[in-house]
Amino acid sequence: MPQFVRDIMTSNVMTINETQSVQEAAAIMSQYNVGAIPVVNNSGQMVGIITDRDITLRTTAQGQNAQTLVSQVMTAQQMVQGTPDMDVHAAAQLMAEQQIRRLPVVENGKLVGMMALGDLAVQNQYANEAEQALASISTPSSPQS
């Protein structure tokens, strides 16, 4: 019997507005012990995602200050999303193909949840999918010079 993303996703997801600062994003990440936060606009539509890596590489490493807007450092292009009625196997395959650890779940243009590799890993029936996705995501890349 197929299981859907809605059955295993986290539905109470903290978001941040694109006009807030990276300092506020980092504070939310620290408070909730997460490494990524979906970014929404004033209409509540998801417009990107900001990760701890985005803050480190696009703000701190570039000498930007903590008041830099989230919209300036978030990942917005090629945003990968799932839907609540997506089959869990298909979602895991998408995560592996796109080399992402977290899949924002969107319905009718609004963020309704987040499915992470950890959500797959704690479900015994999806242990293989989690392992395969992690193997694809963890494929080493060469340092860029």
Image (tube, rainbow, N blue to C red):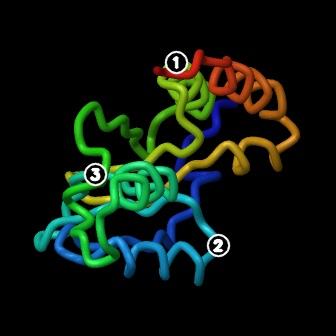
Query: What residue is at 58 percent from the left and 54 percent from the top?
Result: 9
| Image x and y of residue 1, in percent | 69, 30
In the orientation shown, which residue stands out farthest toward the left? 43
Q: Quadrant of residue 16?
A: bottom left
- Residue where numbered disc 3 is placed: 48
Please state which of the two labelled residues, at mark 2 or mark 1, is closer to the viewer.
2
Q: How far apart are marks 1 and 3 (CA)?
A: 19 Å
Left or right, 1 with respect to 58, comes to right
Query: What residue is at 59 percent from the left and 83 percent from the top?
Result: 31
> Going from the N terminus, do you reach mark 2 or mark 1 first?
2
Q: Residues within 10 Å of mark 1 (few under 14, many from 20)?
A: few
What secondary structure is marked by label 1?
A: helix
Q: Front-most of 61 and 58? A: 61
Q: Residue 33 carries which label?
A: 2
Query: What residue is at 35 percent from the left and 71 percent from the top?
Result: 22
| Image x and y of residue 73, in percent | 28, 54
- Residue where numbered disc 1 is placed: 97
Do the residues under discs 1 and 3 have CB atoms within 8 angstroms? no
What secondary structure is marked by label 3?
A: strand
Left or right, 77 with respect to 22, comes to left
> Going from the N terminus, do you reach mark 1 or mark 3 first?
3
Amino acid type of the residue that numbered disc 3 sits on in the rendered structure: Gly
| Image x and y of residue 8, in percent | 64, 52
Q: Front-most of 46 and 144? A: 144
What secondary structure is marked by label 2?
A: loop
Q: Distance between the residues labelled 3 and 2?
A: 19 Å
